[in-house]
Image (cartoon, rainbow, N blue to C red):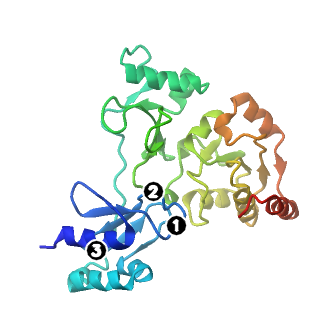
Amino acid sequence: MIDAKERIEILSRALGVGLVDRKGINVAFRCPECKDSKKQKLAVRIDTGQYHCWVCDARGASIAKILRRISPEVASRWEGVTGSHQRRFVDEVIEAPKVELPIGFKLLAESLESKDPDTRGCIEYVRDRGLGIREMWYFRLGFVRRGRLSRRIIMPSFDSEGKLNYWTARSIDEKSIGKYVNPPVPRGEFIFNELNIDWRQELTLVEGPFDLTKCDSNATAILGSNMSRKSALFQAIARNRTPITLALDSDMPEKQHKWAKALSEFDVSVKMLDLGGRKDVGEMSKQEFLEAKSKARNWDKFQGIINLSRIMRSGSIL
């Protein structure tokens, strides 16, 4: 029998404090491999040493590979404790958990008459963001009354066949610890609400799921500022040569041009949407978004270089 406590203690010396799952087998740490290191998305199996980051998709048969770069001393201790037991599992694969809706999930659109104060809070939050009954149904917005997901708006995602592939839960309380809660699913392996996408029509790309509530119907979220060329979304766009309008957050202008360039290399036409000084699409009204999209400009390589030069001169890229 393995000494789970000792192994977790060794890993924590190099990776920081970890979150142990209910079975006591997987421990989640901040990933030293990706920029999203503020979130504990690096899953490590303490019995086998396998690791997988659900954000940047870094993975391997032995966490010792990462430990050696951080602390050779810790890596040596880890290998000494795990020994040959770890090597028997090198061919196993850490599988992504099956995605299921949170227990107690209910649709907001079916709960408008609820007297529960937390449910009322969720409904008022959605309405304050300018969303009505149509948006509640279209995005299948929901909530749960109890547990760590209470007082959060839950937006589920479905693949092209209508099968649940993801969900995100946004807190309605600004001072809440952790604005979003998401299932531990590798983001590059699915397309957010592909069920709503027509690949033959111009597609708007935004960063966050709740930005979609202000877009036209043919839109999807890349779930952050990164989109790998190997991701399901990038591959689908390239395969279908779907025209794209990029409407990413204003604090990442270099990302806009990076992905415009990458998509254009696959003969995908790209337009750039001007947020008009707003942080993201979520701060716009739907009418403001539609007006901005009608004025979106075609991206070309030379204009991209000029814009990046302006950004660098202004000090936006550090």
**Can residue 217 be seen from the camera position used here?**
no
Q: Amino acid at mark 1?
A: Cys
Q: Where residue 5 appears, x then y in whole percent?
A: 20, 67
Mark 1 or mark 2, earlier in chain: 1
Quarter where residue 23 is shown: bottom left
Tell which circle, 2 or 3, labels the residue nearer the N-terminal end. 3
The residue singled out by tag 2 in the image is 39
Disc 3 marks which residue? 10
Task: Find numbered disc 3 in the image and state the secondary structure of the residue it sits on.
Answer: helix
Circle 3: residue type: Ile
In which quadrant will I find the C terminus? bottom right
Q: How crowded is the residue under tag 3: few (<14 C-alpha within 10 Å), some, or many (20+)? A: some
Dot 1, how many residues are within 10 Å of its Cα: few (below 14), some (14-19), or many (20+)?
some
In the image, 236: left or right of 164?
Answer: right
CB of mark 1 within 8 Å of CB of mark 2?
no
**For mark 1, what is the residue?**
34
Which of 32 and 239 lies nearest the eye of the viewer? 32
Q: Is residue 171 above or below residue 163?
A: above
Instruction: Give the residue displayed 28% in from the left and 63% down from the top.
Output: 26
> How far across and how far down the image is residue 1, in percent?
11, 73
Q: Position of residue 4 (x, y in %)?
A: 19, 68
Residue 166: in sight, yes or no?
Answer: yes
Distance between mark 3 and mark 1 Cα atoms: 21 Å
Secondary structure at badge 1 equals loop
Q: Secondary structure at mark 2?
A: loop
Residue 81 shown left or right of residue 100 in the figure? left
- The residues tagged by marks 1 and 2 sit, at their Cα atoms, a distance apart of 10 Å
- From the viewer's side, name the closer residue of 137 and 114: 114
The amino acid sitting under disc 2 is: Lys
In the image, 37 versus 162, the foreground residue is 37
